[in-house]
Image (tube, rainbow, N blue to C red):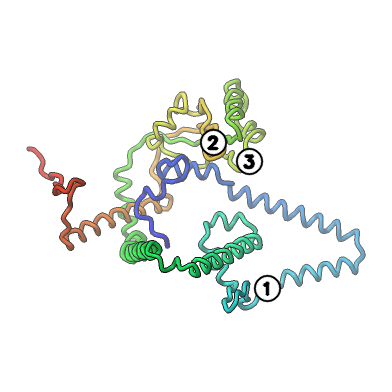
């Protein structure tokens, strides 16, 4: 399990905003799972109907032969661990390619057909092996710079391995998580939270045209369907806190209120987005299960700080400023 040391590690999503905004707005740009499953079922039904119609127009022997061929193909499985490449005495087998696939982001794996993904990683494996062998032949594995990089990599792996072993159990402990949740409930402050929908366009001009159309009363949902990029134009099903809304995003609206639309396009990657606040309500605490991942990150951060402070004392660390003068610890005394 990959270790994340603080809440900030989960921030790099929509516009590099904070964790709450990142999670909610990322979901608004991700295809709704229920919708996708529904579409898949409709596609399967259409295919079955087409196959039935096609079968009825063919001779019985041909239909039976095709059905048998399809059944054999379905039952065909790859047995053992076949060789994918043989380069001299070196063999690269199927399980090595599969192991590489497991390191890829889950979303990428889900969106790419299995056979195509295997071919891509197969090619990548061959390229990597050949380039590494050529680098060794050139003696680069004995160069000082390479050895230094390897040492740094070893240190990083050792660093993460230790932290995973020492801190991860605490961050996943159910009792600790529930205690942190109770603290969250005590510290929770009420306010307003909103839902946001987006229309993504290819160009800034298209986005400005959409904003202009909305100002004249055009339905947001219709423009979203007719003008937007289907993969990015989505309706969020999550509420996000207005108090966590960055000032630069607030400035994109004339006011933060229900049905408010951004007064100018927001560029994200290669698309221009028009945002609309579809609903606003009083905020309420998240359930334990909803914020459990965030609680885990907070515990990791707290435990990391405790560990470093403990180790600083254990190893008698002396701290200095950039100019070499001793670093003065901040005063902990308070005036009466």
The C terminus lies in quadrant: top left
Name the secondary structure under disc 3.
loop
Answer with left or right where residue 60 lies relative to residue 12: right
Point 83% across, 58% down: residue: 52
Question: Which of 88/153 is in front?
Answer: 88
Q: Which mark is residue 77?
A: 1
Distance (Cα) linking label 1 and label 3: 36 Å
Q: Position of residue 252 (x, y in %)?
A: 47, 28
Instruction: Indicate whether 18 appears above or below 168.
Output: above
Question: Which of 211/12 is in front?
Answer: 12
Point 52% across, 45% down: residue: 27
Distance (Cα) linking label 1 and label 2: 44 Å
Q: Which mark is residue 302?
A: none
Q: Which residue is mark 2?
A: 197
Point 81% across, 71% down: residue: 68
Q: Position of residue 44 (x, y in %)?
A: 72, 55
Badge 1 density bin: few <14, some 14–19, many ≥20, Cα 10 Å: few
Instruction: Indicate whether 27 appears above or below 2.
Output: above
Q: Which residue is mark 3?
A: 230
């Amino acid at each position: 399990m990959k270790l994340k040391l603080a809440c900030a590690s989960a921030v790099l999503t929509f516009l590099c905003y904070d964790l709450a905004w990142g999670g909610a707005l990322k979901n608004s740009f991700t295809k709704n799972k229920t919708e996708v499953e529904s579409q898949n079922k409709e596609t399967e039904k259409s295919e079955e109907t087409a196959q039935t119609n096609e079968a009825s127009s063919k001779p019985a022997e041909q239909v039976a032969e095709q059905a048998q061929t399809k059944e054999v193909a379905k039952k065909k499985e790859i047995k053992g661990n076949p060789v994918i490449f043989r380069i001299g005495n070196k063999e690269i087998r199927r399980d090595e390619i599969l192991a590489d696939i497991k390191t890829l982001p889950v979303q990428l794996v889900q969106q790419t057909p299995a056979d195509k993904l295997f071919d891509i990683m197969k090619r990548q494996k061959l390229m990597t092996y050949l380039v590494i062998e050529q680098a060794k032949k050139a003696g680069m594995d004995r160069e000082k710079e390479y050895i230094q990089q390897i040492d740094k990599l070893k240190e990083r792996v050792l660093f993460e391995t230790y932290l995973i072993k020492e801190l991860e159990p605490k961050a996943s402990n159910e009792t600790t998580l529930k205690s942190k949740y109770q603290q969250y409930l005590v510290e929770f402050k009420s306010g307003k939270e909103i839902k946001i929908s987006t229309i993504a366009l290819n160009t800034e001009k298209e986005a400005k045209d959409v904003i202009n159309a909305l100002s004249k009363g055009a339905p947001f949902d219709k423009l979203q369907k007719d003008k937007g990029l289907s993969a990015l134009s989505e309706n969020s099903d999550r509420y996000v806190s207005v108090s966590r809304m960055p000032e630069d995003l607030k400035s994109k609206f004339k006011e933060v209120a229900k049905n408010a639309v951004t007064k100018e396009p927001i560029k994200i990657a290669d698309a221009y987005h028009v945002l609309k606040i579809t609903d606003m309500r009083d905020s309420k605490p998240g359930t334990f299960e909803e914020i459990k991942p965030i609680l885990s990150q907070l515990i990791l951060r707290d435990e990391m700080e405790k560990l470093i402070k403990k180790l600083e004392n254990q190893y008698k660390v002396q701290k200095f400023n950039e100019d070499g003068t001793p670093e003065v610890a901040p005063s902990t005394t308070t005036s009466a």
